[in-house]
Amino acid sequence: MITTLFFKELIGQRVFSVKFTKKNGTESKMTCRFGVKKGVTGKGMRYSTIEKNYVSVYKFDKEASGFRTLILANIIEVKFKGQIVSKKQLDMMYIQHLTEQFTNQYSTQIQQLQSVA
């Protein structure tokens, strides 16, 4: 499952759309972005979004704009950079990201092991 940090890194400061399942089981869509400072009081949240694997976003809506919390496990699909990415594709991108990190971190040791084999 993708993490808060990976999701924020992937999306960046762009506006994106997300289709997700609400806690009550209904599907919903919203257009939102990270990094909005409007209305921030400086108090912070009462819980860690990173520990819960949530992301805090600013939702753009004619009637109900404001900050929302998105549960990453409930994402169905995300649209950003003009492409629609499913939950399964997000998970695969995260696995690829982890593999690249692991390979970069341990490339010397991997090469040594391969030369012995």
Image: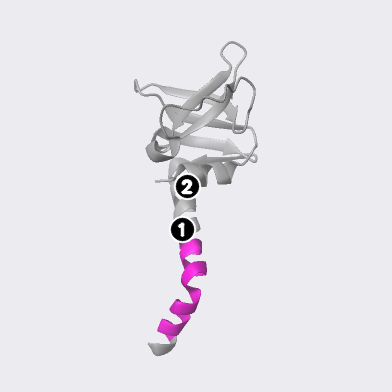
Q: Position of residue 25 (x, y in %)?
A: 34, 23
Whether tag 1 and tag 2 are in contact, CB under 8 A, the answer is: no
The quarter holding residue 73 reads top left
Label drawn at residue 89: 2
Q: Is residue 44 magenta?
A: no
Q: Amino acid at mark 2?
A: Gln
Tag 2 secondary structure: helix
Q: Secondary structure at mark 1?
A: helix
Report crowding for label 1: few under 14, some 14 to 19, many 20 or more residues within 10 A (C-alpha). Answer: few
- Which residue: 53% across, 36% down? 78
Q: Amino acid at mark 1?
A: Leu
Q: 37 and 59: which one is in front?
A: 37
Q: Spot the residue most to the top.
A: 63
Residue 30: image location, x then y, percent? 54, 24
Q: Is residue 37 left or right of residue 18?
A: right
The range drawn in magenta is 99-114
> Residue placed at 49% from the left, 68% from the top?
105
The secondary structure making up most of the magenta span is helix
Q: In the shown orientation, is residue 56 left or right of residue 116?
A: right
**Residue indicated by mark 1:** 98
Q: Position of residue 100 (x, y in %)?
A: 51, 63
Callout 2 environment at 10 Å: few (<14), some (14 to 19), or many (20+)? few
Q: Residue drawn 55% across and 41% down? A: 8
Q: How many marks?
A: 2
Q: Magenta stretch containing residue 106, yes or no?
A: yes
